[in-house]
Image (cartoon, rainbow, N blue to C red):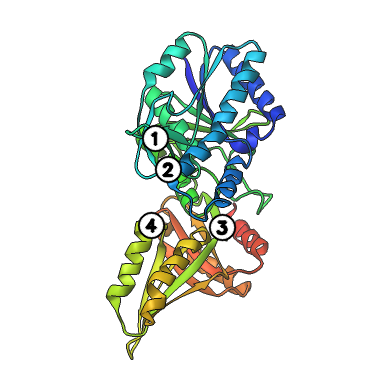
Amino acid sequence: MNLIVQKYGGSSISTIEKIKNVAKKIKSKKEDNYHIIVVVSAMGNTTDKLIKLSKQISPLPDKRELDVLLSIGEQKTIALLAMALKELGLDAISLTGAQARIITEGEHTNSIIKDLDKNIILEYLQEGKVVIITGFQGVNSKGDITTLGRGGSDTSAVAIAGKLNCPCEIYTDVDGIYSIDPRLYPNARQIDYISYDMVLALSTLGAKVLEKRAVQLAKQLEVPIYLASSITGNIGTTIRGAETVEESKIVGLAVDENCAIITIESTNSNKEEIMSILNLLTHLGIDINTISISNVSNGYMSMSFMCSRDDYGIVDSIEKLICVPSKDLKITKDENSMKISLIGSGINKITDYHSILLKIFYSNNLMIKHIANSETYTSYVVDKGDKNKVISDIATEFNL
């Protein structure tokens, strides 16, 4: 059986006309003798609208009930797409996460896929049907609807492809991965082939490519991913194992402006209190990186780290619960920062790249606040400035 999983994101199916166009592309693939499983997101910004709706009821809605509400978006899409395919003469069936028996575990709104029953999918495929499945959701052992968190539809598609041992095509409104986000640098180079590790680094460091959990799962299950344009249908980038890919030393540049430096200060050198706050933030799911600790005389101590500005609500709650009553602790936020990261295989072996970056930042009058290195990336946290000029300067120096 010639199997393929296709995933269509929210922007690719944001209108009825786009859903009809997607149906035509699926029909064309079906005519090439493929058995097709389609995974879809909610239409456009439906999920954001549902979250806003829930917050009209409560600023912190119950997570179980929020999952029930958010699951509506993908269910709407699968039904409409199935109707569109039937109008084109194809036999199609829509399945929710529960109907496809996608079993999850973990907390509501951020669950992980534990298992899925491929036999249900295969039975429908053998009947000649196109199987359309909701991304982003499943059910737990209690039978409760669960969701996988932001970007969860990518993870759903990869998990299904892994279980069926077939490739996964992900269709978006861009035609692949570029060395730099084309919206930031129009002359960016399209990347034809790239490894899981490089995509994971790009995703983690702020590039809007793929959800990192999906990339991790694809690497684990050895699922090849093909990124394609939902408009033209052309495949722009293939993601696969590094052993089959020859990569340039520097693959790309990621820019993250949605970040802030959080500093926790103690006037009595209470390491235990500071570490308890850090542990609590980590436990609550905040992605903390680039930590630095300073010890100063006269009982003063501070710890700084970076996090997403999306986590401000949690940070503020911790400040009210712990820092205000303590009086010895204070949290400050530095929002005038952006993180610029170079990504590549064995990047630290490249001669003089640090001095080149330093020269660019200093020539643009940007103060350097933090530096982090690994085998696959180097990140500089600097003042916000003329972002476009800095990106252009780096792209020119490193031929990106």
Distance CA(mark 1)–CA(mark 4):
22 Å
Residue lying at 63% horizontally and 19% vertically, measured from the top left: 83
Q: Earlier in the sequence, mark 3 or mark 2?
A: 2
- According to the image, label 3 marks what residue? 255
Is 309 rendered above or below residue 221? below
- Circles 1 and 3: CB distance less than 8 Å? no
- Circles 3 and 4: CB distance less than 8 Å? no
Q: Nearer the viewer, residue 82 or 128?
A: 82
Q: Amino acid at mark 2?
A: Arg
Judged from the image, the secondary structure of the residue bearing numbered disc 2 is helix
Dot in front, 4 or 2: 2
- The crowd level at tag 1 (other Cα within 10 Å; few <14, some 14-19, many 20+) is some
- According to the image, label 4 marks what residue? 284
Residue 43 position by quadrant? top right
Residue lying at 34% horizontally and 63% vertically, measured from the top left: 280
- Circles 2 and 1: CB distance less than 8 Å? yes
Distance CA(mark 2)–CA(mark 1):
8 Å
Q: Amino acid at mark 3?
A: Val
Q: Nearer the viewer, residue 57 or 159?
A: 57
- According to the image, label 2 marks what residue? 64
